[in-house]
Amino acid sequence: MRRAAGLAALALVALLATGCATTSAGSPATSSPPASPADTLSGDLTVYAAASLKTAFDELASAFEAQHPHVRVLPVVYDGSSTLATQLVEGAPADVYASADEANMATVTDAGLAGDPKLFATNTLVIVTPDGNPAGVAGLADLADEAVSVVVCAPEVPCGAASRTLLSNAGVTVKPASSEQNVTAVLSKVAAGEADAGLVYATDVRGRSDVEAIVPEGADRVVNRYPIVAMKDAANPAVAAAFTAFVVGPHGQAALRELGFGAP
Amino acid sequence: MRREGAGFVPQILLLPALVGLALLVLPLGALVARVDWSTLWADITAPEALSALVLSLGTGLTATAVCVVLGVPLALVIARSAPRTAGVLRALVTVPLVLPPMVGGIALLYLFGRTSWIGGALAELGIRLPFSTPAVVLAQTFVALPFLVLAVEGALRTSGVGYEQTAASLGAGRWTILRRVTLPLAAPGLVAGIVLCFARAVGEFGATALFAGNAPGVTQTMPLAIYTAFNGAGVTQGSAVALSLLLLVTSIGVLLLVRAWRPETPR
């Protein structure tokens, strides 16, 4: 009996040990020697960005790579800002974090993971409907109609927080059919025709022919501000700082304006 | 003659039986119907889909190997323990099996995360486990290990210790008995366990999402790529459908493999 228990304990220890061993063997060696400014930048860059930044940051990442041929921007991790903030607080390895609002950025900076974030864009909400607007939605008040199935972002994510403010400003109570974890999830449900209407960012619907957008009353008073920051523990601090400066700088700003984001 | 036995089932029960069967089969049919066969190959080999596929295969196989290395000894220990100890150990092994994987993901994060003492100690050594590829393997191992342990343990218990005692009385050492008697007798259970373990590892979503995150090329396995695609980011929905089909085909293949190896199971 005692022998069996001892053996079981051994097996458990073995399980833990293997878990650790796999790590040390498999952890990627992304660190590179600190590079001086200009074109001596090199190495990999990991960016965590809000889902609403997908088009913009895919474009900015390629432009940044073009400017710095020795830098490789790893596929950007896009998700709801709050999901990313939680992952960063729990130790996810990012060099740069771009949030869709200041509240989720505060989660990361308050944890002591990053210094001083810089605002780089603003965004406002629109009502999005499938092509042809089958439910005949004309304004925020129509979203309260039980017959209209509405999807919004969950209140923890920036688009959800903004949606809540927008709706309460207008005195409208909506029972959403679903609360999604990021804005692209809302858009894809509406675009697929699975919902009659949703609230997404103005930039999300730009250039899309499969959905229709309505600018609701009071949208200009609910503005999301996007901050970006280089993480303190960045594997590649020089490149992280350069990318942050690039987004805030003239090239990044021009690209963001082009995609419909407002000036910070 | 063909329907002997069916005569004892009340005919009215045919209706719920048919509805139940339809509920299981029709959604999969709808998935297959949505596949765009002309772009299937391109969808699967799109860079993002391919990286999810390669990552899934790599981590799934690694997790299966880890499960064999840890699970077979664990199964041996359980099968050869006194009944009460075995019962407790079996219950402990079964918990992750019935636990929602999301809970497993949070539990792993709290054990190895930066805010835990193990995670903190590892960080001192420069090892960061969460949100890395090894974290994917660990999450998959966590959810898949019980399948292997229980399958092998069941086989070991069924085969009993009679042959082992005989071998020992004929002078065979412990390793010889393990190699020549115990493991060959448990082989069907081991194969079934390995196959189920691999299938579970490849399909793993919840624990991976919470413990390993969703970074393309690093922790974004096939199920996560499919989920992300349906949230409108990452791979295209065409790729998601193609990857889903691939997972479906894999599952059916796994099922056939288990059946082929266990001919005594009713088909």
Image (cartoon, rainbow, N blue to C red):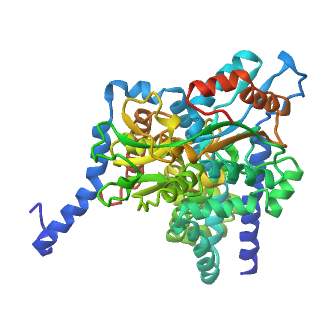
Q: Quadrant of the N terminus of chain A?
A: bottom right
Q: Is residue B2 visible?
A: yes
Rendering coords of residue B37 (x, y %) = 32, 28
| The quarter of the displayed image where residue A121 is located | top right
Q: Nearer the viewer, residue A158 or B207?
A: A158
Q: Residue at x 49, y 44 (%)?
A: A200
Rendering coords of residue B64 (x, y %) = 59, 49
Q: Say left or right for B14 vs A263.
A: left
Is A213 above or below relative to A9?
above
Rendering coords of residue A247 (x, y %) = 72, 29
Q: Residue at x 70, y 27 (%)?
A: A73
Q: Residue at x 83, y 21 (%)?
A: A41
Q: Residue at x 66, y 69 (%)?
A: B77
The mark total stands at: 0
Q: Say left or right for B10 vs A126.
A: left
Q: Nearer the viewer, residue B118 or B97?
A: B118
Q: Is residue B249 visible?
A: no
Rendering coords of residue B149 (x, y %) = 58, 63
Q: Nearer the viewer, residue A227 or A194?
A: A227
